[in-house]
């Protein structure tokens, strides 16, 4: 039987891994080498740096991260030690896409403007960038994509960074790298931020250092850059620059990919990877999540109002903004903002995804049905489109 150590913020671990051995949950932020004694499998999230310092005295045979990104994992060290590795690419993609849609829907009339011919610029065409482009395309919203690491012929609407920054909404989904010739670290610095139009909505749901937070604060203070900014990620996490938070339209505690659906999918993907690496039989365990129906949609809703209602029905980004502002506003000397930031993630409420939700289509008009299906909902009832 395996001895499995998992970050306490990874759900359904007993459901998917219990048959393989003993599952122990720990705080991923404070994980120490001593906790790895006798451990065979380590499963983490992005708050845990996995490298020689953590693993040198362990007998860990497999490391998995329940995230799409893996900049926190020293994969070269794992390979040198013969330690298996897997991540969960795409598991949280739809969750992040719905976060972006919620941000667009919550800030002014951005959604109306996009449906009327506005353009979204996407930096990064990995799993999340592709999922966002597909969702925008289904909704009839134009987009441009910048990703210099890929064959430009494989990217729809491939553009330069300058062209992407000229769009009405700019959404960042790059992995974090300092690798030349196209590092994403501080991809948006002072010059890039000042090139953005004041009416542009900037969204960063990738990694904090993709945007220079110092340059962003200066741009917001001086008005030389985007007036409307949404940040889910921050340089120096779990600490948050209080002055920067004051000036952004919406802020959250690195939870864009925190839908319950995405996290459970990541756990299942890691279970399959563990079994494949250690040559163990993998059961076809069903998801522990039940299908989630939505309330009936009002016949008076259409276009942006319908999209906004559906998105906010599943996820209201303003709640996460309020929660983050509450913890950063504490002025008691003994208050630990970083610990509270992690606490928001650890105790994150159950958030289901809009895609896959059940919608009763018996009373919906064809235009409503088209938008509901474009959002990934499952339509049931006699009135559904065929």
Image: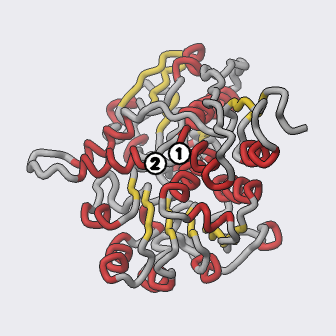
Name which residue lies at 70% across and 77% down: 159
Observer-nearest of 134 and 238: 134
Name which residue lies at 41% across and 74% down: 227
Name which residue lies at 59% across and 61% down: 111
Observer-nearest of 292 and 242: 292
- Placement of the C terminus among the 4 image quadrants: top right
Q: Name, please, the residue furthest toward the left.
A: 333
Give the residue number, with chain letter if any, for mark 1: 257
Give the residue number, with chain letter if any, for mark 2: 317
Q: Is 359 on the left-hand or right-hand side of 248?
A: right
- Placement of the N terminus among the 4 image quadrants: top right
> Helix, strand, or loop for circle 1?
loop
Q: Residues within 10 Å of mark 2 (few under 14, many from 20)?
A: many
Q: Which is more N-terminal, label 2 or label 1?
A: 1
Please state the horizontal and vertical placement of residue 125, each as a whole percent of the image: 68, 62
Q: Is 348 on the left-hand or right-hand side of 299?
A: left
């Amino acid at each position: 039987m395996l001895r499995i150590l998992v970050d306490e913020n990874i759900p359904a671990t007993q459901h998917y891994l219990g048959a393989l051995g003993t599952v122990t949950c720990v705080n991923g932020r404070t994980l120490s080498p001593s906790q790895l004694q006798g451990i065979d499998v380590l499963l983490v999230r992005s708050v845990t740096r996995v490298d020689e310092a953590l693993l040198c005295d362990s007998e860990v045979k497999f490391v998995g991260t329940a995230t799409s990104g893996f900049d926190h994992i020293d994969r070269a060290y794992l390979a040198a030690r013969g330690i298996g590795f897997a991540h969960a690419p795409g598991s949280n993609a739809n969750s992040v896409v719905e976060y972006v849609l919620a941000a667009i829907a919550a800030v002014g009339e951005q959604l109306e403007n996009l449906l009327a011919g506005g353009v979204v610029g996407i930096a990064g065409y990995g799993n999340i960038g592709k999922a966002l482009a597909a969702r925008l395309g289904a909704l009839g919203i134009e987009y441009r994509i910048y990703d210099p690491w890929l064959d430009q012929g494989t990217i729809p609407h491939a553009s330069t960074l300058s062209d992407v920054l000229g769009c009405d909404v700019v959404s960042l989904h790059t992995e974090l790298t300092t690798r030349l010739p196209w590092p994403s670290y501080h991809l948006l610095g002072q010059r890039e931020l000042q090139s953005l139009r004041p009416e542009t909505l900037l969204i960063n749901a990738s990694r904090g250092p993709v945007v220079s937070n110092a340059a962003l604060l200066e741009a917001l203070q001086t008005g030389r850059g985007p007036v409307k900014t949404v940040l889910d990620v921050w340089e120096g996490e779990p600490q948050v620059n209080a002055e920067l938070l004051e000036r952004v339209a919406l802020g959250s505690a690195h939870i864009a990919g925190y839908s319950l659906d995405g996290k459970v999918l990541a756990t299942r993907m890691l279970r399959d990877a563990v079994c494949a690496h250690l040559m163990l039989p993998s059961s076809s365990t069903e998801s522990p999540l039940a299908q989630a129906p939505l309330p009936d949609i009002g016949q008076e809703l259409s276009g942006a109002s319908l999209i906004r209602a559906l998105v906010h029905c599943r996820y209201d980004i303003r709640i996460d903004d309020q929660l983050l502002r509450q913890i950063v506003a504490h002025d008691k000397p003994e208050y630990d903002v970083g610990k509270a930031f992690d606490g928001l993630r650890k105790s994150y409420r159950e958030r289901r995804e809009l895609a896959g939700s059940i919608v009763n289509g018996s009373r919906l008009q064809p235009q409503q049905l088209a938008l509901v299906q474009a959002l990934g909902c499952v339509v049931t009832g006699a009135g559904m489109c065929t």
